[in-house]
């Protein structure tokens, strides 16, 4: 890091040279007259950067710190020099540009405060444009090709030194490439553009001024930004920080700032597209290589947060009302299709119109002008929701898995996640009830395994089919893909792309091609996050890169079950808590506690674990009517069959529980049903229910009863069943009910 307080003239000049700036010795104010001039013949150095030896020759014996920068081709920059001491016109021109083009926010680039109190903004010259060198009557001077500016630490005739603004020196910030709107404005200012182009720019600025600030970005056909990504990052950072200040003006802690930065960056990353696609390489890494990734974004965030009590507080208090955007907008996704062209983006980079304001709809005008769309208010009203026709969920296994559910099952290594995942997949594919979840129909299931070799997948597949008993999986309903059979799959389907991590463009292309090739699926089981994604799973950026895929599968009505690991404490999902934010259910598997151990839970005996959707798990679809589907339970694989019981019940054979009179009546009906079944110690739910109806404990069904009415009538039966299970009087395995007394 350059240390200006301890640097001599040669150190300063060498520093400028290291950043590609052509530094030359300059005259001292005591010379009188036009002293802002180089002391050497400098015209021969306008087009190419000199070497280090020449810098040393010029500055080795320098007696003062007087120096300047030759602008134009040799340095690759130009400078906008605002002579504020001559009057307000220069700053009015600059602030007017910023208000229209940059939300009134100053551009992040190298900035000098001159000895006379003016401002000099340094910009890299865009390809294809030659910056002019001109003075103007309003005090805006452009130093482009063939130009020269005095540079720090030179002394001004006022006695003050030229100085880099805090945080805006070349060693602290990259010199910004000039946005196109600035180049156009300079051309117009110095008369370097045609009248026709000038008229177009005037119309653009008038439209922009009436519709609010924007930043021009170029988007592809999916609305992903490919040009103007740095401008997008700047506006997203500034708008997010302003909104954060408005929520609470107390400056957040560093940890809170990092978390918020990552949250906003995740949205930025989903909106941006790398210029170059590489299979198996995540978008985050490609953007980072191009200088438009998290490092760039975090640097802008840090600089904005450093101005929390200054520029941020001032802007948050004084920007017009329509600048304020609720934080929820950060997660808004662009849904409409757009054609490749130049778009105008709002404070969060959401594309809202084409560059010159054409084709604006009434809805866009309502946003900009503040008018009220009464039809939209009616559409979004709670009254409309009350009568809206919403289709019933397409249930696969109860409310735990539907074609729009996103669920996690998490547990430590070796606890049985894969056994449970394959069992769930087999039950769904065969249309069989499983644990507390009722199956509604056989569905097409795709199981994606990321780590097991073929010799382990095969026996697990055979075990899963055997454990279904007499129930058979319809041919092709359950498909399992593993890394070892990728070549075999590609031989039968040559168009299948290579298998790649699912948080990369290549991985997403592979999965969607696979789903299309097999004719579509209703449910995908991903086993597991660690092996199917790349990157550090402690960092939410690795997971955020797969969220587009998660969302897309839901729009295609494909249910998702992701298997994941727990952290070191075994009761929480590994990595960032943001993983579960978009998910409906998180089931946490944990080893059995001592009090839950039964006689069968011995080494070499049952596979047993607890399964809970309570915190830190999640059950968004739990209701008073279906809570049993999400109750904490003990799950065991006993005698090659999956069985369950409520987690707060005692272990089998350890404790007896008393019964209420109502529950005892149902238990006595069960004993009668066992006799009627002719199977010692067990019966079925159907026979038991019929016996309860015969005894008048449950209302009988009529031919006119629909599913809702039957569900209502069997409510007492389900309640007593649960009570008897908790009291350890019965055990339930699917349709079979076992008497434990």
Image (spheres, helix red, strand yellow):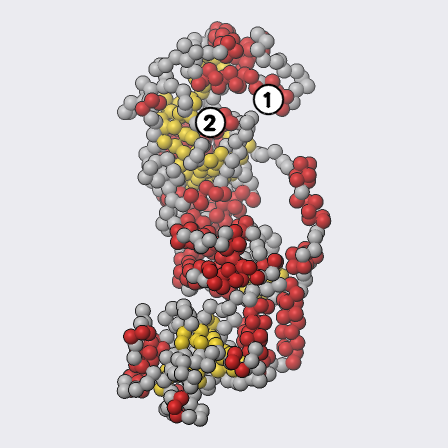
**Mark 2 — residue?**
631
Count of picture labels: 2
Tell me whether the residue at label 2 lies in contact with that at label 1, contact meaning CB atoms closer than 8 angstroms: no
As measured in the structure, the alpha-carbon distance from the residue carrying label 2 to the one carrying label 1 is: 19 Å
Residue 579 at what x, y percent from top left?
44, 44
Quadrant for the N terminus in the image: bottom left
Mark 2 vs 1, N-terminal side: 2
Callout 2: few (<14), some (14-19), or many (20+) C-alpha neighbours within 10 Å?
Answer: some
Q: Which residue is rendered at x = 40% and y = 43% of the image?
A: 529
Q: Is residue 545 left or right of residue 654?
A: right
Reply above or below: 328 against 633: below
Which of the numbered marks, if any, corresponds to residue 190? Answer: none
Reply above or below: 422 against 363: above
Residue extending furthest toward the right: 374
Front label number (2 vs 1)? 2
Q: Which residue is rendered at x = 57% and y = 82% of the image?
A: 138
- Element type at mark 1: helix
State whether residue 679 appears in this view. Answer: yes
* Along the line of sight, the residue nearer the viewer: 156 or 233: 156
Callout 1: few (<14), some (14-19), or many (20+) C-alpha neighbours within 10 Å?
Answer: some
**Mark 1 — residue?**
711
Q: Which residue is rendered at x = 61% and y = 13% of the image?
A: 699
Residue 437 at what x, y percent from top left?
49, 27
State whether residue 494 appears in this view. Answer: no
* Along the line of sight, the residue nearer the viewer: 246 or 614: 246
Q: Which residue is rendered at x = 64% and y = 63% of the image?
A: 211
Reply above or below: 575 against 604: below
Using the rendered view, name the quadrant where residue 285 is placed: bottom left
Residue 201 at what x, y percent from top left?
63, 74
């Amino acid at each position: 890091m350059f240390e200006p307080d301890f640097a001599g003239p040669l150190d300063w000049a060498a520093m400028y040279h290291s950043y590609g700036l052509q530094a030359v010795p300059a005259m001292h104010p005591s010379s009188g007259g036009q002293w802002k001039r180089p002391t050497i013949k400098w015209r021969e150095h306008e087009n190419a950067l000199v070497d280090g030896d020449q810098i040393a020759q010029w500055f080795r014996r320098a007696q003062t710190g007087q120096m300047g920068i030759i602008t134009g081709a040799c340095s690759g920059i130009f400078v906008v020099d605002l002579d504020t001491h001559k009057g307000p016109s220069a700053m009015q021109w600059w602030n007017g540009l910023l208000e229209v083009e940059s939300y009134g926010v100053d551009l992040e680039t190298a900035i000098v405060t001159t000895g006379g109190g003016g401002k000099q903004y340094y910009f890299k010259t865009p390809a294809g444009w030659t910056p002019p060198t001109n003075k103007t009557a309003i005090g805006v001077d452009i130093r482009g090709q063939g130009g020269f500016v005095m540079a720090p630490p030179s002394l001004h005739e006022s006695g003050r030194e030229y100085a880099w603004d805090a945080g805006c020196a070349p060693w602290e910030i990259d010199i910004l490439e000039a946005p196109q709107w600035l180049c156009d404005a300079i051309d117009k200012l110095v008369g370097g553009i045609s009248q026709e182009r000038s008229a177009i720019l005037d119309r653009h600025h008038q439209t922009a001024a009436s519709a609010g600030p924007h930043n021009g970005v170029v988007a592809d056909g999916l609305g992903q930004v490919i040009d103007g990504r740095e401008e997008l990052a700047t506006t997203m950072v500034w708008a997010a920080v302003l909104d954060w200040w408005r929520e609470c003006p107390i400056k957040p802690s560093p940890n809170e700032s990092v978390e918020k930065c990552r949250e906003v960056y995740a949205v930025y990353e989903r909106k941006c597209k790398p210029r170059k696609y590489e299979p198996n390489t995540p978008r985050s890494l490609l953007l980072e290589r191009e200088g438009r990734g998290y490092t760039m974004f975090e640097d802008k965030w840090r600089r904005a947060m450093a101005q929390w009590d200054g520029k941020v507080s001032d802007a948050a208090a004084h920007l017009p009302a329509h600048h304020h955007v609720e934080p929820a907008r950060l997660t808004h996704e662009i849904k409409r299709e757009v054609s490749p062209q130049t778009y105008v983006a709002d404070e969060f980079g959401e594309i809202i119109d084409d560059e010159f304001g054409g084709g604006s709809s009434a809805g866009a005008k309502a946003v900009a002008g503040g008018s009220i769309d009464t039809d939209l208010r009616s559409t979004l009203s709670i009254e409309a929701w009350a009568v809206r026709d919403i289709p019933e969920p397409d249930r696969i296994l109860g409310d735990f898995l539907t074609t729009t559910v996103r669920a996690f099952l998490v547990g430590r290594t070796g606890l049985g996640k894969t056994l449970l995942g394959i069992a769930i997949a087999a039950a769904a594919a065969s249309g069989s009830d499983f644990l507390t979840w009722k199956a509604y129909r056989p569905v097409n299931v795709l199981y994606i395994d990321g780590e097991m070799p073929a010799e382990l997948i095969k026996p697990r597949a055979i075990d899963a089919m055997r454990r279904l008993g007499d129930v058979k999986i319809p041919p092709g309903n359950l498909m399992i893909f593993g890394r070892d059979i990728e070549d075999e799959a590609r031989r039968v389907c040559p168009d299948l792309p290579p298998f790649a991590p699912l948080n990369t463009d290549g991985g997403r292309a592979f999965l969607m091609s696979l789903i299309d090739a097999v004719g579509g699926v209703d449910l995908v089981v991903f086993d597991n996050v660690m092996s199917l994604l790349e990157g550090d799973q402690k960092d939410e950026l690795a997971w955020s890169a797969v969220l587009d895929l998660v969302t897309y599968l839901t729009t295609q009505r494909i249910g998702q079950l992701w298997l994941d690991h727990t952290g070191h404490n075994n009761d929480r999902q590994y990595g960032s808590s943001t993983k579960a934010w978009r998910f409906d259910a998180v089931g946490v598997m944990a080893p059995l506690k001592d009090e839950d151990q039964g006689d069968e839970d011995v080494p070499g005996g049952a596979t047993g674990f607890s399964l809970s959707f309570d915190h830190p798990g999640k059950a968004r679809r739990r209701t008073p009517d279906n809570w049993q589907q999400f109750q904490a339970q003990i799950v065991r694989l006993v005698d090659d069959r999956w069985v369950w019981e409520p987690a707060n019940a005692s272990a089998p054979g350890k404790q007896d529980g008393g019964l209420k009179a109502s529950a005892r009546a149902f238990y006595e009906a069960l004993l009668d049903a066992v006799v009627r079944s002719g199977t010692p110690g067990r019966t079925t739910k159907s026979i038991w229910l019929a016996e309860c109806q015969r005894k008048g404990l449950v209302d009988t069904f009529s031919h006119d009863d629909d599913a809702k009415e039957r569900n209502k009538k069997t409510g007492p039966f389900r309640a007593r069943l649960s009570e008897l299970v908790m009291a350890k009087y019965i055990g339930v395995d699917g349709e079979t009910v076992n008497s434990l007394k």
